[in-house]
Amino acid sequence: TPNGKLNRLALPEATQEITRTTKFVPPRDSLERELVEIWERALEVEAIGIQDNFFELGGHSLRAVRLLTEIEQKYDKILPLAILFKAPNVEKLAEFIREKEADIPWSPLVAIQPQGSKPPLFISHGIFGNVMNFKDLAGYLGKDQPLYGIQARGLDGKETPLSSLEEMAARNIEVIKTVQPQGPYFLGGFSFGGLIAFEMSQQLFKAGEKVAFLGLFDTYSPFARQRMKKPPSTLGEKLLFHWEGFTKKGVNYLLDKVKIRLEINSQATNQLENLPLDVEEQKHLSSSAIQASRKIRDASRLAKQKYSIKPYPGKVNDGS
């Protein structure tokens, strides 16, 4: 585009064929044929059968938004992103579209993998509010580990997003107690969601509840920024700041700086992949899901700025 941003819509579509591991089942009626065409455009994959799995075809949150946006525009049917956990193929999704009700009921708690004998693991949403990127995690954890994702308030486009981490954590605690009324709790969060899980643990601890596991995945701590009252601004101040760090920690200081930079780049990449920022793309993806996700992103950034992190008495598992 003229402003230097990448316009993905201007790029040639790199459609690919499926390396099939299951039998191909063709569409049986006009609705399924139309849905197959929508899926092929959203996933950039050819020859999709009605029983092929969205996630196994390379589906992620951005492609889910593309898919459900086109469905919303064509059928005037608003479907939540998490519907793809319940209906991960064309055959099942067609059943929801055939229902007479205008919209599908929305829930903040998504049962990504509800089966298993182990205590459930509750993962808090990231900065854009959805939990689409946790599907692969369920596969790694195995069939005996229940996994639930907690979506942000406002992702349905009907409620106002929360703008403080304390409120987000309190609301998420209410949500998980509908499945597990008492601890010990197993909590986790990716990136911004790690801060929510951290604050949830703080509140549960103060309430006398036990947190058996707290996992933070690629989560940036605002504590480092809080320790430095005034960041170095001039070249001399920056050189002095880094020299003091190097003399105290040696080569480990440089390794830590590289790790922090890689984490920041990783988070930025994830954000760009999870929500299109290009103006031209917004015209094609002006759905309720995009609008809601942007409001949640802005509210989450505000919450992060206001949050004052405090020492946590429990154990933290850092997956950075």
Image (spheres, rainbow, N blue to C red):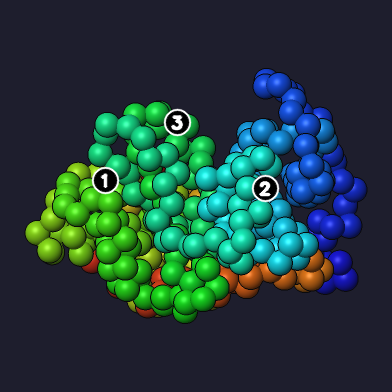
Q: Which residue is mark 1?
A: 186
What distance separates the C-alpha of mark 1 from that of mark 3? 16 Å
The crowding category of the residue bearing disc 1, from other C-alpha atoms within 10 Å (few below 14, some 14 to 19, many at least 20), is some
Pointer 2: what residue?
Answer: 94
Up/down of 186 relative to 21, above or below: below
Q: Please tell me which of labels 2 and 1 falls first in the chain.
A: 2
Task: Inspect this view and state whether residue 226 appears.
Answer: no
* Left or right: 2 as drawn, with respect to 76: right
Comparing 315 with 95, the one in front is: 95
Task: Place residue 212 in its image quadrant.
Answer: top left
Dividing the image into 4 quarters, which one contains the C terminus?
A: top left
Nearer to the camera, 163 or 182:
182
The amino acid type found where label 1 is placed reads: Phe
Most foreground residue, 246 or 213:
213
User: Regarding mark 3 in the picture, which secondary structure is present there?
Assistant: helix
Cβ–Cβ under 8 Å for marks 2 and 1: no
Residue that carries the numbered disc 3 in the rendered image: 140
Residue 70 locus on image (x, y percent):
75, 59
Question: Mark 3 is on which residue type?
Answer: Tyr
Q: Residue at x 81, y 56 (%)?
A: 8
Could you say where residue 260 lies in the image, as x and y percent from the top left? Answer: 47, 52
Residue 29, quarter of the rendered image: top right
Question: Mark 3 or mark 1, which is nearer the start of the sequence?
Answer: 3
